[in-house]
Image (tube, rainbow, N blue to C red):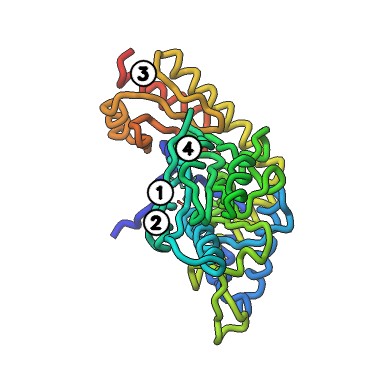
Amino acid sequence: MQRAEPQDFARVLSSMCTVPHPAARAAAERFLATNPGDPGTYETVGTLETEAVELLGELAGHPEAAGYIASGGTEANIQAVRIARNRARNKQTGGEPNVVVPESAHFSFTKAADVLSVELRRAPLSDYRADLSAMETLIDSNTVLVVGVAGTTEYGRVDPIPEIATLAHEYGALCHVDAAWGGFVLPFTDHDWNFADAEIDTMTIDPHKMGQAVVPAGGLLARSGALLDPLAIDTPYLESTSQVTLTGTRSGAGVASAVAAMDALWPDGYRSAAETAQENAEWLAGELAARGVSVVSPELPLVSADLPAATIATLREEGWRISKTGAGELRVVMMPHVTRTMLEAFLDDLDQVAGW
Ligand code: 0PR
């Protein structure tokens, strides 16, 4: 039987995964058979996880952050909701807990709400960003968490994070920032998004997206170790006495590759990747606008453009791995593997299909 091969990245334009950095790939292979879920047995990978959290904390403006390497942004977001729900459960009585998110929040929050039996309240946006007054309308005494997104999945927008944090705390709720995708780009922008910029409590920041680590490597950070306490369960027969992760056995590959990627790329490598990606986003946005296409201006390196569904479908048939926003726009994510040459080839094909 012929051996299956993974796709190459030559035509992948809408994914948030990318080619791992060579050092990250090598580290992942070396640590494939380790389990950071049992750091008493797999000590080295346990130490690496501490390093990974320190490095992520540096990126996020808080080198003393607590946290761990999760399976991805979904787990990190679920855990942030779980922290807030459990913390409130210990404190207050009555009423179903709710979480207030902007409508742009990733669907992982829908999973979190379902798994954790909390009500998800989605606030309408204004100009693709969280609208503070719309959020405040939804917040009440049962709100346990208010979420801001720093780099939205569909339009790459950054919510007003400091204001969201203030709002959350006014109501006694925690504030979580979802920087799953944006976290490795935002340090090189003027946006206020991190632990130094705002009084946020927890953050999702994923090495396996813009961080160029292998899958699975998500990141959950918390301002203090105490914030992770509501996640801790006893592990009677392990050397370590408690565990805060959602998964039990988990891949040391993600942990080791996250450290290797950040060692190799933070900060200069990530800065140049972010700059190149932003240049490419602005170039593509300009080219599309020049053809009369309506484009959402790329604040971060992600371009959404209004193309007919049939055009997108034909380009997919030609092998381009592209997807659409909920509103039907073409979405191109400028991951590190997306080069100008690739974009030129894509535009050539688009010109042919559109016939303009
Ligand atoms: N938060 C944000 C802001 C995200 O964009 C995503 C994923 C998540 C959380 C969840 O992260 P995990 O997928 O690591 O659990 N956003 C991408 C999306 O839904 C995920 C993705 C990745 C989709 C690669 C396709 C793909 O090929 O578009």
Tag nearer the camera, 3 or 2: 2
Q: Quadrant of residue 353?
A: top left
Pointer 4 with pointer 3, Cβ within 8 A:
no
Among numbered discs 1 and 4, the one appearing first in the sequence: 1
Does label 1 point to a residue whose CB lies under 8 Å from ligand 1? yes
Residue marked by disc 3: 351
Mark 3: give few (<14), some (14-19) or many (20+) Cα within 10 Å. Answer: few
Instruction: Name the residue that disc number 4 marks.
Output: 134
Q: Secondary structure at mark 1?
A: loop
Classify mark 3: helix, strand or loop: helix
**Amino acid beneath label 4:** Ala
Q: Secondary structure at mark 2?
A: helix
First reached walking from the N terminus: tag 3 or tag 1: 1
Answer left or right for 346 relative to 179: left
Image x and y of residue 264, in percent:
68, 49
Which of pointers 2 and 4 lies earlier in the amino acid sequence? Answer: 2
Q: What is the spatial separation of the Cα atoms under label 3 and label 1, in whole angstroms?
A: 33 Å
Disc 2 to disc 1: CB gap under 8 Å: yes
Query: Which residue was labeled with disc 1?
Result: 107
Q: Confirm or reject: label 4 Cβ below 8 Å from ligand 1.
A: no
- Report the amino acid beneath label 3: Asp
- Front position in the image: 169 or 282: 169
Q: Is residue 34 above or below residue 121?
A: below
Residue at image position (41%, 19%) is 294
The residues tagged by marks 2 and 1 sit, at their Cα atoms, a distance apart of: 7 Å
Q: How many angstroms separate mark 1 from mark 4 (CA)? A: 19 Å
Residue at screen point 62% across, 83% down: 239
Mark 3 touches mark 1? (CB < 8 Å): no
- Relative to the observer, which residue lies in front, 265 or 116? 116
Q: Please tell me which of labels 4 and 3 falls first in the chain.
A: 4
